[in-house]
Image (cartoon, rainbow, N blue to C red):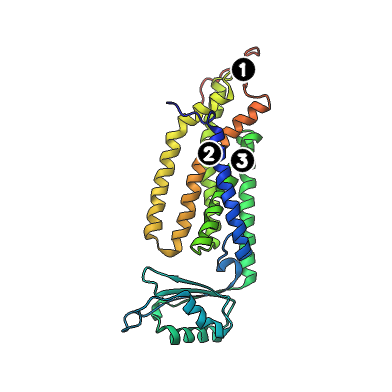
């Protein structure tokens, strides 16, 4: 049975709309909790983050696992009860605490109080990061500007290489991919406490570049098919073009995702969620290139009276000697 993306386009659009609605709900809940659509990391809101691990080499220190409520009781007398606390690690002996911005003396006092209540920490595991709120806002603004510039550049490039309607629906597909990634991380922020940082912006920019690459391949094939068969209906053109590029799209995405899965499994905490964002975005990009951008282009051409490039009653244009 041949794949027909046009015949089943209502199904593809429904799937995307349902995922989008779930994403909107997740972002709304995130906004209520964090005053942002995603759980913001230290890079964006500023503050001080301490990462500590108990020194389990010493006797009886790690007999019990750490509890969030226990840590919060320690922070309350210091006026830090509103801090974000995460107990991490399989053995639950590590802490990640994000507080308001602390000076050197306050950080030392916090560390001493935690050690007194929870036991000694491994000196090699202690990591303290501080980011001012102004720098966080600048990072967010710069990341947003980079995304907008990327979108604008893609519109200009695709308008010159193809036509304006090709560019518009490619951007719709890109928004789809970015939104799906944001939605997944909104859910992860609510359920697992996953924060987004400046690496997440890098991941979004990478997703935009990868996704549009798949869309351009399908668009190229659509344009070639229209040149060779100007009397073919746009629905048939799109179906044929998608079928011809489907294997290439799946293979490219699959090999890339397999590499990223290895980074998620073995790349450490710093790169794990960066790679996860890329996996979500790349899979969404392959999906939107095949099922969203191409089907919307076909619908638009049909509704605007350009379903057939050259009607049978019109003289055919000169055929190219070859199509590259």
Q: Is residue 252 left or right of residue 36?
A: left
Front residue (pair 81, 252): 81
Task: Work out whether residue 9 or residue 271 is closer to the camera in this orientation and state it.
Answer: 9
- x, y percent for residue 165: 65, 34
Label 3: how many Cα within 10 Å (few below 14, some 14–19, many 20+)? some
Quadrant holding the N terminus: top left
Label 3: state its secondary structure.
helix
Residue at image position (58%, 45%) is 176
Q: Which mark is residue 172?
A: none
Residue drawn at 40 percent across, 84 percent down: 119
Q: Position of residue 169 (x, y in %)?
A: 61, 38
Quarter location, residue 94: bottom left
Which residue, given by chain and number where applicable, does mark 3 sit on? 157
What label does residue 317 carry, if any? 1
The residue closer to the viewer here, 141 or 88, is: 88
Please tell me which of labels 2 and 3 falls first in the chain. Answer: 3
- Badge 2 element: helix
Spatial separation of the CA atoms under disc 1 and disc 3 = 26 Å
């Amino acid at each position: 049975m041949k794949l027909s993306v046009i015949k089943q386009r209502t199904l593809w659009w429904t799937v995307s709309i349902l995922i989008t609605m779930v994403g909107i709900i997740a972002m709304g809940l995130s906004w209520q909790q964090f005053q942002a659509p995603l759980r913001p990391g230290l890079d964006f809101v500023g503050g001080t983050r301490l990462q500590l691990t108990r020194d389990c080499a010493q006797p009886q220190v790690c007999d019990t696992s750490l509890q969030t409520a226990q840590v919060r009781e320690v922070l309350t007398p210091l006026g830090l009860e509103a801090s974000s606390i995460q107990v991490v690690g399989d053995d639950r002996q590590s802490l990640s605490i994000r507080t308001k911005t602390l000076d050197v003396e306050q950080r030392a006092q916090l560390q001493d109080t935690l050690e007194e209540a929870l036991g000694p920490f491994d000196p090699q595991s202690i990591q303290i990061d501080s980011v001012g709120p102004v720098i966080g806002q600048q990072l967010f603004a710069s990341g947003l500007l980079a995304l907008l510039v990327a979108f604008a550049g893609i519109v200009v490039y695709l308008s010159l290489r193809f036509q304006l309607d090709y560019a518009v629906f490619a951007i719709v597909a890109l928004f789809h991919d970015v939104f799906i990634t944001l939605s997944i991380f909104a859910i992860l922020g609510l359920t697992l406490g996953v924060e987004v940082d400046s690496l997440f912006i890098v991941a979004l920019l990478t997703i935009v570049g990868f996704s549009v690459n798949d869309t351009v391949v399908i668009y190229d094939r659509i344009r070639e098919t229209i040149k060779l068969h100007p009397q073919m209906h746009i629905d048939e053109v799109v179906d044929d073009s998608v079928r011809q590029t489907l294997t290439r799209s799946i293979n490219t995405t699959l090999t890339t995702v397999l590499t990223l899965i290895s980074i998620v499994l073995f790349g450490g905490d710093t790169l794990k969620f960066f790679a996860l964002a890329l996996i979500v975005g790349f899979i969404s990009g392959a999906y939107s290139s095949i099922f969203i951008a191409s089907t919307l282009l076909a619908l638009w051409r049909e509704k605007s009276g350009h379903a057939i490039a050259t009607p049978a009653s019109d003289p055919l244009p000169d055929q190219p000697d070859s199509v590259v």
